[in-house]
Image: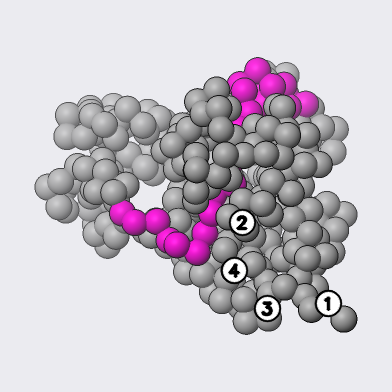
Amino acid sequence: MATKSPPIQTIPVIIGPTAGGKTALSVELAHRFAQRDGVPGEVISADSIQIYRRLDIGSAKPTEEERRGVAHHLLDIVEPTEPYSVDRWLREANEAVADIRSRGATPIVVGGTHLYIKAFLEGLFEGPAPDPALREELAALPSEERRAELERVDPAAAGRIHPNDQRRTIRALEVFRQTGVPLSEHQSQWDRGERRSDAMPVALLWPSALINGRINARVKQMVEQGLVEESRALWESGDLDTQAGEALGYKQLAAHFRGEMPMDKAIEKIRIETRRFAKNQRTWLRRLVGFATASDRVTVYTAGKCDSSAAPRACPIDAESCPQEAWPEAVLEALAR
């Protein structure tokens, strides 16, 4: 009788723009591990919104039907009013990896939130501990004054942080005032860190025109599935008054509920901001694996074939030309290299 091969220990880390098919690939890959090893893979979510209970439709949280019996970790773990940080996620993700491996299964990380992914692959930037008094002082400043200070002391961070993102603005100023070194400089040193050896990025590469079409279709589907009703219930209960309320979709609809814009404009803003978010994700892809579209590198998986010398510790998939049903086999081939 043939013996089963041992579970693959390299962790596939599936990344790509929102609406790009990451969830479906992670679930199918888990089933492929079951066929190959006799033990199904288990999925670890790297999404900073899917951690929240009741933020389901707007976060594209996989339904029970979409999970197809595959175990998922780090979904629905905190209330929307509960603070949650990347360092807590990283700790709990590594605990999940150890737990999954202890049962002879292969972890599959999928996200979502590229800061989580970067922390998982390269470790966490250990900034100074929060200073509540300093944060209170910074929060009391007029937003224009905070923004001007950030542009003066850390123009690189100002270029990345949206003027309306007060939480990240305050953190950047807090780090500078505590250390005298710009946050962007700390992060550039972090960027030079070593990548963990037991993980392989799986990058789904989409051209902007195609992914934008998929995003528009997803927003339409979310509205049809009840996004407005879900958001209204969260808003009325006060669950969108905290960090969770900054999430795409919920933030724009909360503005509508407050009477700041009509419904059609709120939904259009969801589409626009989600497309912008996907563009930022493409930038993250470029930083994480060195390229963000198939045109950046010709040696990517197209019909399930790849020049393994091109990216020995990554699996780039051209999502436009490689059929979706071939993606899992491309990942298995890359893991076997």
Q: CB under 8 Å between callouts 2 and 4?
A: no
Q: CB under 8 Å between callouts 2 and 3?
A: no
Report, in whole angstroms, how far the alpha carbon at label 3 lies from the one at label 1.
19 Å
x and y, in percent, of residue 25 in the image: 73, 48
Q: Helix or strand or loop: what does disc 4 sit on?
A: loop
Picture residue at 52% right of the left edge, 59% below the top: 199
- Which of 283/184 is in front? 283
Q: Helix or strand or loop: what does disc 3 sit on?
A: loop
- Tell me: residue 136, above or below residue 324: below
- Write down the residue under mark 1: 2
Report, in whole angstroms, how far the alpha carbon at label 2 lies from the one at label 4.
9 Å
- Tell me: residue 22, above or below residue 7: above
Residue density around tag 4, few if under 14, some if 14–19, many if 20 or more, within 10 Å: some
Q: CB under 8 Å between callouts 3 and 1?
A: no
| Badge nearest the viewer, 1 or 2 | 1
- Write down the residue under mark 2: 335
Of the two numbered discs 2 and 4 on the same chain, state the one appearing first in sequence: 4
Please name the amino acid that badge 4 sits on.
Gln
Residue density around tag 3, few if under 14, some if 14–19, many if 20 or more, within 10 Å: some
Q: Does the segment drawn in magenta span residue 90?
A: no
Of the two numbered discs 3 and 4 on the same chain, state the one appearing first in sequence: 4
Specify the segment rendered in magenta: 193-217
| Badge nearest the viewer, 3 or 1 | 1
